[in-house]
Image (cartoon, rainbow, N blue to C red):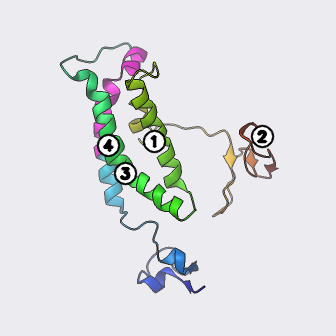
Amino acid sequence: MTLATHADHGNPSDPHAGHKMTDDQGSRDRHAGHSVAMFRDKFWLSFALTIPVVIWSSDVQRWFGYTAPSFPGSKLIPAGLGTLVFVYGGLVFLRGAQRELADHKPGMMTLISLAIIVAFGTSVAAAFGLFEIDVWWEGPAGNVAGLTYTPTVHLNCGEKVMTVRDGLPKFKDFPKEFGGSGTMLPE
Protein backbone atom coordinates (compact mmCIF):
# COMPACT_ATOMS: atom_id res chain seq x y z
CA MET A 1 0.00 0.00 0.00
CA THR A 2 1.52 3.33 -1.08
CA LEU A 3 1.32 6.30 1.29
CA ALA A 4 0.44 9.77 0.04
CA THR A 5 0.12 13.21 1.62
CA HIS A 6 -2.09 16.20 0.85
CA ALA A 7 1.00 17.89 -0.62
CA ASP A 8 1.23 15.03 -3.13
CA HIS A 9 -2.23 16.02 -4.35
CA GLY A 10 -1.18 19.60 -5.20
CA ASN A 11 -2.50 21.22 -2.02
CA PRO A 12 0.62 22.09 0.00
CA SER A 13 -1.11 24.84 2.01
CA ASP A 14 -3.61 22.37 3.47
CA PRO A 15 -3.43 22.33 7.29
CA HIS A 16 -3.26 18.54 7.12
CA ALA A 17 -0.22 18.60 4.81
CA GLY A 18 2.29 15.98 5.82
CA HIS A 19 -0.26 13.64 7.38
CA LYS A 20 0.16 10.18 5.96
CA MET A 21 -2.77 8.68 4.10
CA THR A 22 -3.24 5.45 2.19
CA ASP A 23 -4.06 5.66 -1.51
CA ASP A 24 -7.67 4.78 -0.66
CA GLN A 25 -7.92 7.77 1.66
CA GLY A 26 -6.02 10.10 -0.64
CA SER A 27 -8.14 9.26 -3.64
CA ARG A 28 -11.37 10.31 -1.95
CA ASP A 29 -11.28 13.79 -0.39
CA ARG A 30 -14.01 13.82 2.27
CA HIS A 31 -14.38 17.59 1.88
CA ALA A 32 -14.44 17.72 -1.91
CA GLY A 33 -16.92 20.30 -3.15
CA HIS A 34 -17.33 21.88 0.28
CA SER A 35 -16.54 25.52 0.90
CA VAL A 36 -17.16 27.93 3.73
CA ALA A 37 -19.21 30.12 1.38
CA MET A 38 -21.43 27.19 0.36
CA PHE A 39 -22.19 26.28 3.98
CA ARG A 40 -22.71 29.95 4.88
CA ASP A 41 -25.18 30.50 2.03
CA LYS A 42 -27.05 27.27 2.79
CA PHE A 43 -27.19 28.22 6.47
CA TRP A 44 -28.65 31.71 5.91
CA LEU A 45 -31.27 30.57 3.41
CA SER A 46 -32.22 27.61 5.61
CA PHE A 47 -32.38 29.94 8.61
CA ALA A 48 -34.64 32.38 6.74
CA LEU A 49 -36.96 29.54 5.67
CA THR A 50 -37.02 28.20 9.24
CA ILE A 51 -38.50 31.41 10.67
CA PRO A 52 -41.97 30.95 9.11
CA VAL A 53 -41.84 27.22 9.94
CA VAL A 54 -41.43 28.13 13.61
CA ILE A 55 -43.98 30.98 13.51
CA TRP A 56 -46.72 28.78 11.97
CA SER A 57 -45.94 25.73 14.14
CA SER A 58 -49.01 24.91 16.24
CA ASP A 59 -46.87 23.69 19.16
CA VAL A 60 -44.80 26.88 19.23
CA GLN A 61 -47.98 28.97 19.00
CA ARG A 62 -49.44 27.10 21.97
CA TRP A 63 -46.23 27.39 24.03
CA PHE A 64 -45.97 31.14 23.55
CA GLY A 65 -49.71 31.86 23.54
CA TYR A 66 -50.08 33.51 20.14
CA THR A 67 -51.94 32.77 16.93
CA ALA A 68 -50.13 33.11 13.60
CA PRO A 69 -52.02 34.82 10.77
CA SER A 70 -54.36 32.39 9.02
CA PHE A 71 -54.99 32.40 5.28
CA PRO A 72 -55.64 29.72 2.65
CA GLY A 73 -52.64 27.38 2.70
CA SER A 74 -51.12 28.75 5.93
CA LYS A 75 -51.41 25.33 7.58
CA LEU A 76 -49.09 23.95 4.88
CA ILE A 77 -46.28 26.42 5.64
CA PRO A 78 -44.47 24.21 8.20
CA ALA A 79 -44.68 21.07 6.02
CA GLY A 80 -43.81 22.82 2.76
CA LEU A 81 -40.92 24.94 3.99
CA GLY A 82 -39.74 22.19 6.38
CA THR A 83 -39.44 19.83 3.42
CA LEU A 84 -37.62 22.50 1.40
CA VAL A 85 -35.14 23.08 4.25
CA PHE A 86 -34.63 19.32 4.62
CA VAL A 87 -33.84 18.88 0.93
CA TYR A 88 -31.86 22.10 0.36
CA GLY A 89 -30.00 22.29 3.66
CA GLY A 90 -29.76 18.57 4.35
CA LEU A 91 -28.62 17.21 1.01
CA VAL A 92 -24.96 18.02 1.68
CA PHE A 93 -25.14 16.04 4.94
CA LEU A 94 -26.97 13.13 3.30
CA ARG A 95 -24.37 12.94 0.51
CA GLY A 96 -21.56 13.17 3.05
CA ALA A 97 -23.10 10.35 5.07
CA GLN A 98 -23.40 8.26 1.93
CA ARG A 99 -19.66 8.71 1.27
CA GLU A 100 -18.78 7.96 4.91
CA LEU A 101 -20.87 4.79 4.93
CA ALA A 102 -19.43 3.68 1.58
CA ASP A 103 -15.97 4.04 3.16
CA HIS A 104 -17.19 2.12 6.23
CA LYS A 105 -16.21 5.16 8.34
CA PRO A 106 -19.34 6.80 9.75
CA GLY A 107 -18.66 10.26 11.14
CA MET A 108 -20.33 13.61 11.77
CA MET A 109 -22.10 13.68 8.40
CA THR A 110 -23.69 10.33 9.24
CA LEU A 111 -24.69 11.54 12.71
CA ILE A 112 -26.23 14.77 11.40
CA SER A 113 -27.99 12.85 8.61
CA LEU A 114 -29.48 10.43 11.09
CA ALA A 115 -30.79 13.33 13.18
CA ILE A 116 -32.37 15.20 10.28
CA ILE A 117 -33.84 12.02 8.77
CA VAL A 118 -35.48 11.13 12.09
CA ALA A 119 -36.81 14.68 12.54
CA PHE A 120 -38.11 14.79 8.96
CA GLY A 121 -39.59 11.28 9.14
CA THR A 122 -41.35 12.09 12.41
CA SER A 123 -42.69 15.30 10.89
CA VAL A 124 -44.07 13.45 7.87
CA ALA A 125 -45.60 10.78 10.11
CA ALA A 126 -47.20 13.50 12.27
CA ALA A 127 -48.58 15.21 9.18
CA PHE A 128 -50.37 11.95 8.32
CA GLY A 129 -51.76 11.66 11.84
CA LEU A 130 -49.45 8.95 13.18
CA PHE A 131 -48.31 11.26 16.01
CA GLU A 132 -50.15 14.04 17.79
CA ILE A 133 -47.22 16.42 17.75
CA ASP A 134 -46.14 19.18 15.42
CA VAL A 135 -42.40 18.80 14.86
CA TRP A 136 -41.72 20.44 11.47
CA TRP A 137 -39.78 23.17 13.25
CA GLU A 138 -37.45 20.69 14.95
CA GLY A 139 -35.49 19.59 11.87
CA PRO A 140 -34.70 23.06 10.52
CA ALA A 141 -34.20 24.61 13.95
CA GLY A 142 -31.87 21.78 14.97
CA ASN A 143 -29.25 23.12 12.56
CA VAL A 144 -29.45 26.73 13.76
CA ALA A 145 -26.34 27.90 15.57
CA GLY A 146 -26.92 29.31 19.02
CA LEU A 147 -29.45 26.72 20.16
CA THR A 148 -28.13 25.16 23.34
CA TYR A 149 -27.39 21.48 23.67
CA THR A 150 -26.12 19.98 26.89
CA PRO A 151 -24.45 16.59 26.46
CA THR A 152 -24.71 14.09 29.32
CA VAL A 153 -22.41 11.31 28.12
CA HIS A 154 -19.40 10.98 25.83
CA LEU A 155 -19.05 7.87 23.65
CA ASN A 156 -15.61 7.01 22.37
CA CYS A 157 -15.09 6.74 18.64
CA GLY A 158 -12.94 4.13 16.95
CA GLU A 159 -10.45 6.78 15.91
CA LYS A 160 -9.29 9.57 18.22
CA VAL A 161 -8.02 12.92 17.02
CA MET A 162 -7.46 14.41 20.46
CA THR A 163 -8.29 13.72 24.09
CA VAL A 164 -11.53 15.31 25.24
CA ARG A 165 -11.63 16.51 28.83
CA ASP A 166 -15.22 17.53 29.40
CA GLY A 167 -16.09 15.93 32.73
CA LEU A 168 -18.61 13.59 31.11
CA PRO A 169 -18.57 9.84 31.69
CA LYS A 170 -16.76 8.08 28.84
CA PHE A 171 -17.74 4.58 27.75
CA LYS A 172 -15.59 2.08 25.86
CA ASP A 173 -18.55 1.27 23.63
CA PHE A 174 -22.07 2.00 24.94
CA PRO A 175 -23.76 2.11 28.35
CA LYS A 176 -25.31 -1.23 29.41
CA GLU A 177 -28.78 0.31 28.94
CA PHE A 178 -28.00 0.66 25.22
CA GLY A 179 -26.60 -2.85 24.74
CA GLY A 180 -22.94 -2.06 25.38
CA SER A 181 -20.51 -3.34 27.96
CA GLY A 182 -20.92 -0.29 30.20
CA THR A 183 -17.13 -0.22 30.63
CA MET A 184 -16.01 3.27 31.67
CA LEU A 185 -12.78 4.87 30.47
CA PRO A 186 -10.67 7.33 32.47
CA GLU A 187 -10.99 11.08 31.80
As drawn, 112 above or below 60? below
The label number, if any, that marks residue 91 in the structure image: 3
Mark 3 falls on what kind of element?
helix
Q: Amino acid at mark 2?
A: Lys
Disc 4 and disc 1 in contact, CB within 8 angstroms: no
Q: Nearer the viewer, mark 4 or mark 2?
A: 2
The residue that label 1 is drawn on is 117
Q: Amino acid at mark 4?
A: Ser
Nearest to the observer: residue 98 or residue 75: 98
C-alpha gap between disc 4 and disc 1 = 16 Å
Q: Position of residue 158 (x, y in %)?
A: 67, 60
* Residue 63 forms part of the magenta stretch: yes
C-alpha gap between disc 2 and disc 1 = 26 Å
Disc 4 and disc 2 in contact, CB within 8 angstroms: no
The label number, if any, that marks residue 176 in the structure image: 2
Query: Which mark is first along the chain, 4 or 3?
Result: 4
Q: Nearer the viewer, mark 4 or mark 1?
A: 1
* Residue 70 forms part of the magenta stretch: no
C-alpha gap between disc 3 and disc 4 = 12 Å
Query: Which mark is first along the chain, 2 or 4?
Result: 4
The residue that label 4 is drawn on is 46
Disc 3 and disc 4 in contact, CB within 8 angstroms: no
Q: Position of residue 42 (x, y in %)?
A: 32, 50
Mark 2 falls on what kind of element?
helix
Q: Amino acid at mark 1?
A: Ile
Query: Which mark is first along the chain, 1 or 2?
Result: 1
